[in-house]
Amino acid sequence: MDKFIVIGGIPLKGEISVRAAKNALLPCLAASLLTSEKIIFERTSLLVDIFSMISLLEHLGVKIEGKVGESITLKADEVSSLVAPYDLVRKMRASVLVLGPLLARFKKAKVSLPGGCAIGARPVDQHIKGLKALGAEIDYEEGYIVAKCDELKGGDIFFDKVTVGGTQNILMASVLAKGRTTIANAAREPEVVDLGNLLKKMGAKIEGLGTDRIVVEGVDELKGGVHNPIPDRIECGTFLAAAAATKGKIKVKDCNPIHLEAFLMKLEEMGYEVVSNENSIFLNGEKEVNSVDITTSPYPGFPTDLQAQFVALLTQAVGTATVREEIFETRFMHIPELQRLGADIKLEGNAAVVKGKTSLKGAPVMASDLRASASLVIAGLVAKGKTIINRIYHLDRGYEKFEERLQSLGARIERIK
C-alpha cells in the first residue's frame, strides 16, 4: 500500500492549474445513460473515482472511447445490464447516481447500496423519497435497491435536508418523466448546476439551477452533447490552504473563484492577501495571520470538503478557533492524527477547538478518508522533520498526481510504493 514521506518547512511557491472537478464529472458520466447518443467530455481527471465510475458504466454496457485524463466519449446505445453490483458500487458512494438515469430510461434498476469514505452516515433515503414521488416502486433485496416503474411522472419533491447526490439523482430521473417536477430544498452546489447544464445541452428543460427550487419539464428523449466540466473547487482550496499554512505564495489557475467565495472570505478575514481574477487566485501567505471560526454548511456556505484542510491551516494561525462540522457527524477523524504531529486541538461534540501557533513535528500518521489525507499532507508540509502518511489510496480518489504537483511548487514529498 502506497504512502507519502513528507519533509516539512518549505514554503510553497509558483503556479498550478486546477483539474476537472471530480464531484461534477461523476454525475455527468452517469448522465450518459439517459441517451443512446454520444456524450463527449472535453476534459477529465486521472482519479481513482473516475476510473471506478467508468468501470461501472462499462459493466452496464456503455461504450467508452478516448483517454481518461484527456477527452473521452461515452455512448449508451447498447446497455446490456441494469444491475450495479456490490463489488463495483462499494468502492465509491457516487455509484448510486446511476439509479435515477437507469430508472428513467429503462424503467427498472438494481443498484447496490453505496460505499465510500468513512465520514459518517450518508443515507440514500432522500434519493428514494424523490423517486417514489415520481412514481417508482422501491424494494430492498440483500443490500440492493430494486426500483421499477411503468412510467415516471412529474411530482413535487421536498427534501428534508439538503442533499447533493439526491438532487442530482432526482434531476436525472425527472428529465425523462412525464410532466412537471418541482424539487424544493434542492442543493445549490456548482456541481449540481454543472450537471443541469449538461442535461440542458442534451435537450432537458430545467429552470432554477443554482437556487433551492428547481423545476423540470419532462421530455420524451435526450440527445448527445459536448461538455467541459467545471474546475475542482476543493482541489483549488486545498492548494491555497497548503500555500497559506507553509507561508508560501502561489497562483492557482484555471479555477472559478466564485465557487470558493466563503472559503476565500475566511482567508481574507485571517489576514492573507488574496487576489481573484476571472479564472485565477493569487495568495500571499508570508505574513502572520489570526485564527477565525468556521462552520460548515451547504453551498454557498463553507464547504465540508475543505474543513480538514482548514483545520491544518489553523494550527499555524495566531489565536484559538472553533470549527463546527454541521454536515457529517464523524468528519473529525483527522484530529487524532494531527494531534500526533503536535497539534493542540480539543474535540467538543461536533466542534473542534484549535489552538494556533503550535510547532508541528513529523511522525507516522494514518489517513482515514479523502479530505483527511489532504489535511495530513498540509500538516506534514509544515511540520519539522519527516512525516509518513499511510493509506494514501484515499487521496488518489480525489487528487490527480498530488505529490508531483506539490513538488512543482517546491514541496519535499515522495510516494513510496
Image: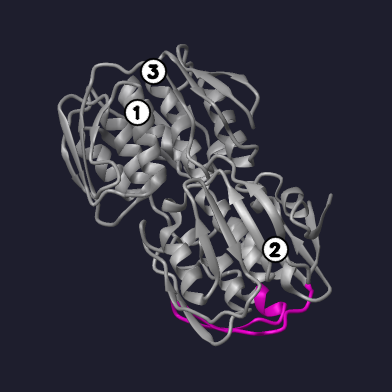
Q: Disc 2 on helix, strand or loop?
A: helix
- x, y percent for residue 123: 39, 53
Residue shown at the point (32%, 27%) measured from the top left: 200
Whichever of callouts 3 and 2 sits on the residue coming sooner in the sequence is: 3
Residue shown at the point (72%, 49%) measured from the top left: 405
| Residue nearest the observer in this picture, 315 or 368 | 315
Q: Which residue is mark 3?
A: 35
Say whether residue 338 is left or right of residue 104.
Answer: right
**What's the amino acid at mark 1?**
Leu
Spatial CA span between label 1 and label 2: 37 Å
Q: Which residue is mark 2?
A: 377
The question of residue 232 being in magenta is answered with no
Coloring scheme used: one colour
Q: Which residues are magenta?
A: 337-363
Q: Is residue 105 above or below residue 309?
A: above
Q: Is residue 161 above or below residue 353?
A: above
Mark 1 Cα shell of 10 Å, populated few (<14), some (14-19), many (≥20): many
| Residue nearest the observer in this picture, 34 or 225 | 225
> Do labels 3 and 2 touch, CB within 8 Å?
no
Residue shown at the point (18%, 24%) measured from the top left: 178
- x, y percent for residue 190: 39, 46
Q: Which residue is mark 1?
A: 199
Whichever of callouts 1 and 2 sits on the residue coming sooner in the sequence is: 1
Say whether residue 296 is left or right of residue 184.
Answer: right
Mark 2 Cα shell of 10 Å, populated few (<14), some (14-19), many (≥20): many
Residue shown at the point (55%, 71%) measured from the top left: 272
Q: Disc 1 on helix, strand or loop?
A: helix
